[in-house]
Amino acid sequence: DISFTLRSGNSVAIVGPICSGKSTMINLIPRLYDVTGGCVKFDGVDVRKLGLKQLRENVGIVTQETYLFNGTIRENLLYAKPDAKEEELIEACKKANIHDFILRQPQGYDTVVGNRGLKLSGGEKQRLSIARILLKDPSVMIFDEATASLDSISENAIQEAIDPLIESRTSILIAHRLSTIQNSNAIMVMDHGKIIERGNHKSLLEKKGTYYRLYTGDLEID
C-alpha cells in the first residue's frame, strides 16, 4: 500500500520501525519478489515486462550482510564486471575508501579474502561490496542497512564512500542510523507496509511524529 516516484539522479531514504516493510519493498525492484497488486515501473516500464538479466544489470544492492567468495579481492570485484580493466578496479576502490587498505595487504589485489571474507573486518567487507557495485555501474543503487552492524570508525569510512554516490546517482537507502540519511533528497517513513510520513530531515523533525520518535530513540528501528 505504497506509492512514490524516484527520479533519475535523486536519492530517497526509507526508515521505519521493525517489520514495517522496508526491505520487502526494495526487493520488489529487482524482482526478488513480485508484486501481488499494482506495479513497479522502471523508466516507465513494468519490471515484469523486462528480462531479469536486463533488469538486474541496472540494479545494484549493498546489503547489511556482505557476500564475498573464497577468492582474491580482484576476483570478488571482477564478479561485477569480468572485463574490467585494472584502472577501473583501482578507481572503484578509491571511491569506496578501500584502495589504500588493499595496497597494504601482502598480495595487494591478489590477496585471498577467505570464505565469506572471513579474513576481513565488517567495514572492509562492506567497502569492497561498495567498490563492486561501483564497478558494475548500475542505473539504481540500493543500500540496505549498509552501516547497521559496524563500529563508528568503519561507519564513517563507509559513509564517506556513500555520500558522494547519493549526490550523483539514483539511489535508495534503508537506514538503521538516521544520521546517515540526512542528505537524501527525500525521506519516507514506513509502518505496517504503508508510507506514513514524507519530507526532508528538518521538516520531519518539526512534525514530531514517527520520524521524530525514531530519531530521538523513543521508537525502536530495525
Image (cartoon, rainbow, N blue to C red):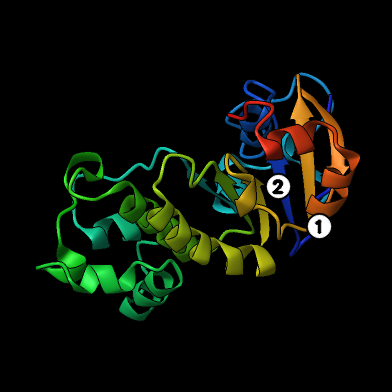
Task: Judge the density around disc 2: few (<14), some (14-19), many (≥20) Cα neighbours within 10 Å.
Answer: many
Q: Is residue 207 shown to the viewer in this render?
A: yes
Looking at the rendered structure, which numbered label has been put on residue 98? none
Q: Relative to 48, is 85 on the left or the right?
A: left
**C-alpha gap between disc 1 and disc 2:** 13 Å
Question: At x 61% / y 39%, what residue is drawn?
Answer: 30
29 or 163, which is in the foreground? 163
User: Which one is earlier in the sequence, the residue at label 1 or at label 2?
Assistant: 1
Residue 83 locus on image (x, y percent): 36, 68
Pointer 2 residue? 13
Q: Amino acid at mark 1?
A: Arg
Question: At x 57% / y 59%, what residue is drawn?
Answer: 138
Considering the numbered disc 1 on the image, is that residue within a helix, a strand or a loop?
Answer: loop
Q: Relative to 96, is 17 on the left or the right?
A: right
In this view, 194 is above or below 188:
above
Looking at the rendered structure, which numbered label has been put on residue 7? 1
Considering the numbered disc 2 on the image, is that residue within a helix, a strand or a loop?
Answer: strand
In the rendered view of the protein, which quadrant contains the N terminus? top right
